[in-house]
Image: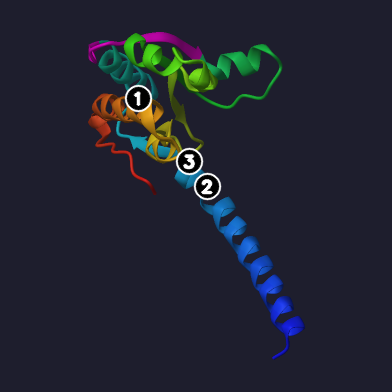
Amino acid sequence: MNRFTLAIGIIIGFAFGAFFTGLTFKIAAPNILFKEIESPYSFDKTVEIITNRIKRQPGWHIVSIIDQREEILKHGGPDIGPMKIIKFCNADLSGRMLIADDRKFFGVKVPASIAVYEKSNGKVYISVMNSKVMSKLFSGTIQDVIEDVIRDAEQILNFVHFRYTIF
């Protein structure tokens, strides 16, 4: 085999590898980056349980509850069905994360969010960002704070036996 053939083989192999890696990530990303859990309760009951559990979790408070359906309808969008986004925060953890200038970019994820919605099948679901994956992308204070958030969020959602996982 000459060098030209070897170089072409390496280039083609790399191109196929990059393509299939990208395709695999595109297919798997929704399941890796987000976690969706079916709730055994009605929509309103699920929102009530989560908000009560946040209020009882030490250090946490509700910042707002956005009625996403109402917001969309009010501004001319289609009816998406029941959906509320619960924004909640822990001042100590947020302060630790955002006090340093090199971590202020993380403000886009503060406060934390939990979405509760009803799908067209009539079942109620809870979704969260997969913080376990997010924590693996960082080190130091960012990873430490995310791990603390994970611990508390799992407590809040343990009524549906939720645990963060890498996949």
Residue 139, quarter of picture: top left
- What's the magenta region? 56-66
Q: Nearer the viewer, residue 84 or 130?
A: 130
Q: Nearer the viewer, mark 1 or mark 3?
A: 1
Instruction: Mark 3 and mark 2 in contact? Answer it, CB < 8 Å.
Output: yes
Residue 125, quarter of picture: top left
Q: Which residue is mark 1?
A: 145
Residue 33 got which mark?
3
Q: Position of residue 109 (x, y in %)?
A: 49, 22
* Disc 1 residue type (three-letter): Val
* Disc 3 residue type (three-letter): Leu
Q: Secondary structure at mark 1?
A: helix
Q: Secondary structure at mark 2?
A: helix
Q: Position of residue 95 (x, y in %)?
A: 39, 11
Q: Residue furthest bottom?
A: 1
Density class for disc 3 (Cα within 10 Å; few <14, some 14-19, many ≥20) is some
Q: Which residue is mark 2?
A: 29
Density class for disc 1 (Cα within 10 Å; few <14, some 14-19, many ≥20) is some
Q: Is residue 29 left or right of residue 57?
A: right
Q: CA distance from mark 1 to mark 2?
A: 23 Å
Q: Is residue 166 left or right of residue 162?
A: right
